[in-house]
Amino acid sequence: MLETIAKKMAELGFTQYEARAYVSLLQNFPATRYEISKQSGIPRSAIYDIIKRLERFGAVNAISAKPEKYVPLPPDKLIELLENRYKSKIAEFYRGVSNLQVNLESENLWNITGYANLILKAREMVANAREEIYLSAWNREIQELKNELKAAVERGVKVVLFSFTKTVNLGLVYCYNLEEKELEKAWDHKIILVRDREELLMGEANKEIPRKVAWTQNKAIVMIAANHIILDITLYGVRVGVDISEVVIENHPGELALVGRLLRERFPDKPAINLDFSKAAAEPADTLTV
């Protein structure tokens, strides 16, 4: 337990010795430096400097002088202290970098590495959605985003989910209800997330191996990805006989009706061509295209 908590504290910027000293005090206080050293395994030659650094930070306090004994700051107060300090440092950093002349093209393709970072970015995108979310993913990843997706639906965002696996019932859901474990024998987990036709996150969702996924605001790439999801849903509709007109919407009023007529004239004997998506013409202009 001590080592596990100490590792978490180390991720917050404490050294291993500082973390072990603090956790040791939580378990047995008040304590002298000698007692802390003995309980935590920190060398006696190092314990003086360790306690002084923790004292300057505010994580421990001395309550007596002879001999000096220390008590830890309660965990909830330490978290509050860390939050305030990080907020302050972030604000200072932002003030510094905002004065620099930086010209980064937002339409470039950026890499996000690791499953945890993938999920964090996806949650951020869903939370920032104003109008619509198109998401193609496996149930494991959809479950990770479930709370954010639910909140998006509740605030009126159009949420469209496509999956080959069984998944949640949130928004407009199109799924084949296949067993995830069986599907994993043939495919790797993938995710395509499009927010408001402005932002795309796409790649392999691998929990075991840190893969790179792509993030971009390049409008052409965003629309290609959105159309990929729509194509999968269109094929789903054809295969299982489901009306998918709420998903297949048009970029300009009347274009679906026109394309549908031209296709029926060109392929009069093809049943699938006779599917009518023209009711989508009632949807607002300048939305997703097929």
Image: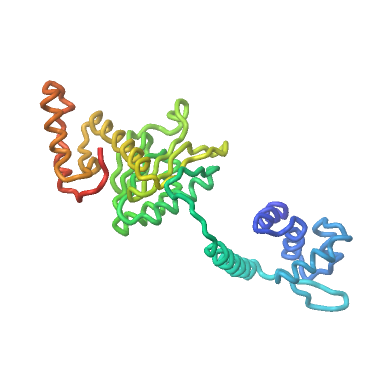
Q: Is residue 249 left or right of residue 194?
A: left
Between residues 247 and 207, which one lies in front from this camera angle? Answer: 247
| x and y percentages locating residue 230 in the rendered image | 29, 38
Between residues 277 and 243, which one lies in front from this camera angle? Answer: 277
Q: Is residue 19 left or right of residue 285?
A: right
- Name the image quarter holding the C terminus: top left
> Is 255 rendered above or below residue 268?
below
Q: Residue at x 20, y 51 (%)?
A: 284
> Is 145 rendered above or below residue 192?
below
Q: Residue at x 83, y 57 (%)?
A: 42
Q: Is residue 184 left or right of residue 237?
A: right
> Is 191 rendered above or below residue 58?
above
| x and y percentages locating residue 1 in the rendered image | 70, 53
Q: Is residue 233 left or right of residue 215?
A: left
| x and y percentages locating residue 83 in the rendered image | 59, 66
Which quadrant of the figure has residue 175?
top left
Give the colouring mode of the picture: rainbow
Which quadrant of the figure has residue 54?
bottom right
Q: Residue at x 72, y 61 (%)?
A: 23
Q: Residue furthest front?
A: 101
Between residues 30 and 176, which one lies in front from this camera angle? Answer: 176
| x and y percentages locating residue 114 in the rendered image | 55, 43
Q: How many marks?
A: 0
> Is 41 rendered above or below residue 144?
below
